[in-house]
Amino acid sequence: MKKALITGVTGQDGSYLAELLLEKGYEVHGIKRRSSSLNTERIDHIYQDIHSSNPNFFLHYGDLTDTSNLTQILAKVAPDEVYNLAAQSHVAVSFECPEYTSEVDGLGTLRLLEAIRFLGMEKKIRFFQASTSELYGKVTQSPQTETTPFHPRSPYGVAKMYAYWIVVNYREAYGLHASNGILFNHESPRRGETFVTRKITRALANIAQGLDKCLYLGNLDALRDWGHAQDYVKAQWLMLQQEQADDYVIATGKQHSVRQFVELAAQKLGVTITWQGQGINEQGIVSAISGDECPHIKCGDVIVKIDEKYFRPAEVDSLLGDASKAQKNLGWRAEKDFTTLVSDMLQHDLRIAKKNALLKSHGYDVN
Ligand code: NDP
Ligand code: GDR
């Protein structure tokens, strides 16, 4: 039985990857952070109680800022594969906490690699690093491939650039089987609530159920290549099954704006949108489709306001990936398209909103 160690197992990708590896018969170990409130919501369905539930899934307290802790976990687990998914992963937050972001996302990767080397495991372990399309930042070439120059635009992007190169360096210097997945944006119903896609689907679902009125956003014109997280964790696994370690762009090859994401979500809910705020054309209403999911919504009831606080000091305007190399070498391609992604996320958030609306109608506080 193969053993895998996942850092960031409580996150979006970590939870899907843990499911995938358990399905494949792995013994899966995850590192979770100590937190004052529960942070295992995404993995509770596969991990309930070590005494009764899944005997192949284990959690260890740890943190990418703690070298001795990482060394001890690696020594104890002795994994065949390590997936480094842990990160302070929010680009906007990285401008507020640049030093912490660098510690975790940059040096954290080095700590893991050094622990592997210190333990003499560099010939046994295969290592995956969650690199990012944020490395490209201010793009000069589209679509982006593995050879497109990097120009990161945030402390997050810069920290991840260090991580990218230290992974390449440990591969070249010590022969470690270490691969970078240059992952373009990928989302799911498990996406963190402050990333733009989930923020939109949650807000529209709540508004459609009469629980909210307004959605505040920043730059509507940002263009992203959005895929589904379930597809992307398959690519992570595939990279570690190759004889040779290498770096791969993982992307759908399709691009949409934040505005288009809002429009499609609204269309699927059958609601109309009024745009307000800086940079918004006073023409206002974008779509007026009579859906049956929320027939009580009146025209213009969903208001999207632009709030400058969501603008970033330096923005990444446009990302579009070319995953031809992954298709050729790994046999990977994105299976779930943009429409499926939006539907999947909306359905999930609508279910929660409906439950909350019901509770509210019976006098319960849902906040
Ligand atoms: P999430 O933010 O959902 O998950 C991040 C995980 O890292 C969480 O489990 C979090 O723990 C953990 N973590 C944060 N800080 C530390 C720390 N100091 N020590 C240990 N663990 C820590 O991210 P995603 O799942 O979306 O992304 C996974 C990885 O892929 C990240 O490295 C991200 O930067 C990268 N990536 C993601 C893309 C995307 O579009 N999703 C695209 C490109 C790259 P907790 O749950 O306690 O917060
Ligand atoms: P991103 O994702 O920065 O691409 O990083 P995010 O969803 O935060 O932003 C995407 C784009 O939307 C614009 N935007 C807003 N963003 C947020 N969060 N909130 C808003 O209200 C809002 N309004 C507009 C942003 O300016 C941006 O242009 C994600 C993370 O998962 C990273 O960890 C990962 O490396 C990259 O994707 C690839």
Image (cartoon, rainbow, N blue to C red):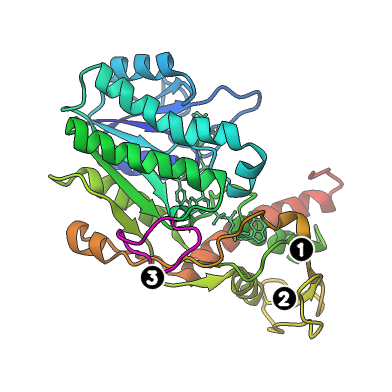
Residue at the image point whose x is 39% and y is 47% from the top? 131
Q: Residue 233 vs residue 104: left or right? A: left
- Residue at the outermost left position: 243
Please say whether residue 344 is one of the residues in the magenta stretch. Answer: no
Rendered image quadrant of residue 272? bottom right
Q: Residue 240 appears at what percent x and percent y?
A: 23, 43
The Cα atoms of the two marked residues, 1 and 3, are separated by: 36 Å
To which residue does mark 3 refer?
Answer: 143
Judge whether 99 appears above or below 214 on screen: above
Quarter in which the N terminus is drawn: top left
Q: Residue 345 appears at what percent x and percent y?
A: 56, 59
Q: Residue 211 appears at what percent x and percent y?
A: 80, 57
Mark 3 Cα shell of 10 Å, populated few (<14), some (14-19), many (≥20): some
To which residue does mark 1 refer?
Answer: 207
Earlier sequence position, callout 3 versus callout 2 = 3
Q: Residue 89 vs residue 306: left or right? A: left
The Cα atoms of the two marked residues, 3 and 2, are separated by: 33 Å
Residue at the image point whose x is 58% and y is 31% from the top? 100
Ligand 2: quadrant of the figure: bottom right
Q: Is mark 1 within 8 Å of ligand 2?
A: no
In-front residue for pair 346/35: 35
Q: Residue type at mark 2?
A: Val
Judge whether 120 appears above or below 157 on screen: above
To which residue does mark 2 refer?
Answer: 271
